[in-house]
Amino acid sequence: MTSTSLFVPSGSRLLRSGFLLPVLLVAIVAILVVAPLARIVLSTLTPEGMAAWKAVLASPLSANLWWRPLFNTMILGFSVASGCLIIGGFLAWLVVLTDVPGRRLIGMMAMLPYMIPSFAAALAWGTLFRNSRLGGSAGFFETSGLAIPDWLAWGLIPTAIVLIAHYYSLAYTIIAAALSSVGADLVEAGQMAGAKRPRIFFGIILPVVTPALIAATSLTFAGAVANFAAPALLGLPVRMQTLSTRLFGMIETGQNERGFVIALLLIAVSALFLFLSDRLVSGRKAFITVTGKGGRTKRFPLGAWRWPLFAVAAAIGLLTTIVPVLVLAASSLAPQSGALFSNWTLHFWIGEGGGEMAQGQAGIFRNPVLLDAIWSTIRLGLVVAFTTMLLGLALAYTIVQRRGSLLATLLSQLAFLPLLVPSIAFAAAYIALFGAPIGPFPSLYGTFVLLVIAASAHNLPFAVQSGRSVLGQISADIEESARLTGAGLIRRLFAIIFPLAIRGLFAGAILVFVKMVRDLSLVVLLFTATSPVLSMVAYRYAAEGFMQFANAITLVILVVCLAASFLAHSLQNRVQKWKES
Amino acid sequence: MKRLYASAIAACFVLPGLALADDLDGLTPQQLLPLAQKEGSVTVFSLSSRIAKVEAAFEAAYPGVDLIGLDMSSTKQIARIEAEQQAGVHAVDVLYIADTPVVFTKLLEGKRIVNYVPPRVESELEDRYKAPLLTQRLSTKVLMYNEKAFPDGSPVSNLWQLTEPEWQGRVLMVDPSQRGELLDLLTEIALHPDEMAAAYKAHYGKDIEIEEGLEGAGEQFIKALFENDLILVPNSDVLNKSVGDANAKNPPVGFGTYSDRRDNEKEGWALQVANNVEPANGILFPAVLTIADKAPHPAAARLLIDFMFGDDTPTGGAGFEPFNVPGDYATRTSIAHHPDSVKLGELKAWTIDPAKTAAARGRIGDLIITLQ
């Protein structure tokens, strides 16, 4: 990877002058993000592309092709981002800063929803709220005699609720990482000065974690506007289109130029919001909380509120994790997808093939490629998480160090975009760009390297956003003193920045890992090996109509993600021994 | 400069290959085999994961030729082949792909693929299945109803019924602005204005009036269908569950896939095709086999396509059997259609012509967007 070369010549004068790193980063971001984006822009400047711009923006089609979907998309984006912030932030505060009972359990449940694909949550919603509009078997509430109106069964409201239930864990992960760096000294100083609890919360804690809140907002916003499964499942029956369903439809029906135009416009609109939120952060003083001294966290006693708040948190966890997981599990056990809770069988997990069930297909644990697939999935996830975080950390470091400068604004804007570029366009651009040999470099077509590069670029926003929110809190003093004693960049990174920022870094790495392990479209376009990854195995089963197998694989993916996050958790506790109190 | 040089070198390798390709087209499988074995492998992008079964059968029949099958949707195949060829990469040999209107405009007209008809089965195929693209089998998007709820047969016998109050909010379709096959279905309806007008007259006893801005009775039907609260769903799974649920009292009808009927027992559905519908119940659309331009293994590619047309038995043998399901139709006449399904000749569906559909599709796509 090119990014590793950043840290090699630690003694070089250029590096110490702080000039080479930004230049290198700009070059890398230009290749990884700007080049594919430029290719997409170029493809919309052809005659067909110009016709597409006109069709989208100024034609009888624009109302239904752009404006109404834009309106729906923005409502979804804002309501999901604020919902996620409230729920994710509440849970993070509860778990990190209070003495609520069952903190570990709540924390674990709050991590889960993002690991469950959003279609599972939409499916769960349907299982409960589906009404008679589509015919077929009604949901739980209608069957028990409660009429569900269309607005509650289909459209914007259920889509927003399902997306909040899915993405709040993203917000939780990032905010919790930032909150854990609010040292006891700060809070105790406030207490000694006689500040009351609300004052401490709004005066100390909230300002300190603002970068994390902004990071969480932008990621959940982007997630919500780019999500396809939930609006498609819950919106189409009442003809609600969002930009993501429009985008998907345009590409799926061969009208790529229109799809790209919509994607570019969506990127522009989102970038505008990101720019405004960036302004919001860089406009005020940064608060340094990681000072290298007194790293304990102070927990607030909740008193009489301990159990009621626990109940609220547990209810959120139950509804957003246990219910979707149950629906997924049931649909991997029920022979008929219309009757999820009857005639359960383990056939789809461990059954022998050749019988009447499932056209003679054996259960997934008898599928010879499963073990291979699990292994290559984990490998892919780990490698991509590692490279993405490495690059993301370097970017976040530069952005934070040069906060407010044009360079920082530019880098942070560019590093955010990949999340909104449709992966099919992203992958196609990568094949076209790196498929041919460039200068001394051989063609990367069909190599694991190309997949890793593309995936790292595509997941960059997670790494940069989560890295930024933590790095922003680390005191420059520590680094300065290390620099004075002659420590090079590498030394400083590994001895100071990594250990202090480890929580945020791992939080980002987990998000990247999960995204990579679940994501299909990027992989299927860039993969040429015959040993598939798990998401491809699930796709194969689903394409043949065997949803039970596909859902069983989804549960396997969930277990892999959970195991990875446990591992990361125990690792970070080992590194930050001083946190134990 | 370097690139020019590289492509010059590539041309030296490819040009003889091109000359060779013309010769290869006339060879029998027996003559192709040694050449294919020399090439060693063949890579295929497949719309169906059943390619895994073909792989096992192919490698057993022709040892020494390794089949590498990658299953991905037609859209992804098109995106990938375009990007690869732009980068000068020629890694895939065979495409097994549907979505033929897009394949026709983006790949065939762009000379990214070449058509090949195996001489062994040439005489058994109708001309329209041999050009512009070689069709291996036909799938359907036709009107389906619930045979448990309507035991006396289809409740719909004329497409225009679907625009009446009785079927308001009770016709389902996967969103045609999301899926190509459904867009093709509506396009085909628009391409038959005379038949749609005749069906209108047969049903209402008067001539149809066409609104301004619409062209023909087909487009008028599409508008009326959308205005009658046509319900759009995201995928065929949702559609089948809604239309087919065996316990439903007053289920809707929907445009779906005939071959999904084979899952009736497994899923508790009662899906049945509404065949007796004026002027047609939907479309038959092709799944084609085609060779990528400058395929790295041209002989093995031809051998594989020949193999996937099956042997001379009524089931088509190991090469075709994975695709021989009731409700899908082999184009090769020696392969018998499944006894449980309506015969191909008796199915009242229009067969799409990729070139014509491709030309008309954009207009219908736009019309649908304005109707939503």
Image (cartoon, rainbow, N blue to C red):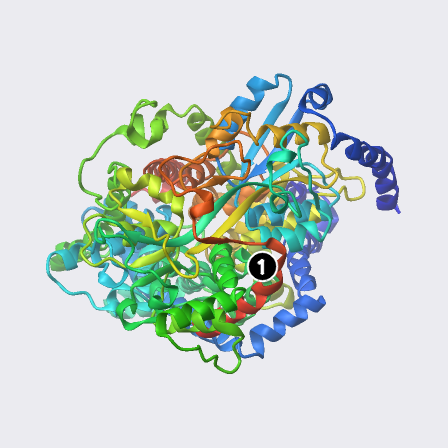
In the rendered image, the vertical position of residue A202 relative to residue A448, given as above or below: below
A77 w.r.t. A25: above or below = below
Q: Quadrant of the C terminus of chain B?
A: bottom left
| In-image side of B69 versus B222 (left or right) | right
Which residue is tagged 1? B357
Residue at image coords 17%, 39%? A342
Q: Chain of mark 1?
A: B
Q: Position of residue B12 (x, y in %)?
A: 87, 35
Residue A29 in sight in this render: no
Mark 1, other Cα within 10 Å: few <14 / some 14–19 / many ≥20: many
Q: Identify residue type, mark 1.
A: Thr
- In screen coordinates, is A551 left or right of B343? left
Secondary structure at numbered mark 1: helix
Image coords of residue B128 (percent x, y)? 62, 47
Residue B167 occupies quadrant: bottom left
Q: Give whichever of B13, A521 is nearer the camera.
A: B13
Left or right of B371, for residue A58: right
What number of labels is visible? 1
- Along the horizontal axis of the image, is B277 left or right of B190? left
Identify the residue at image location x=89%, y=47%.
Answer: B1
Is any part of residue B44 visible from this angle? yes
Give x and y (percent) for residue B217.
48, 72
Height in image: B368 above or below A129?
below
Q: In the image, what residue occupies the spot 67% across and 43% down?
A: A2
The quadrant holding residue A402 is bottom right
The residue under the point 29% across, 55% down is B154
Q: How far across and how far down the image is residue A359, in percent? A: 34, 30
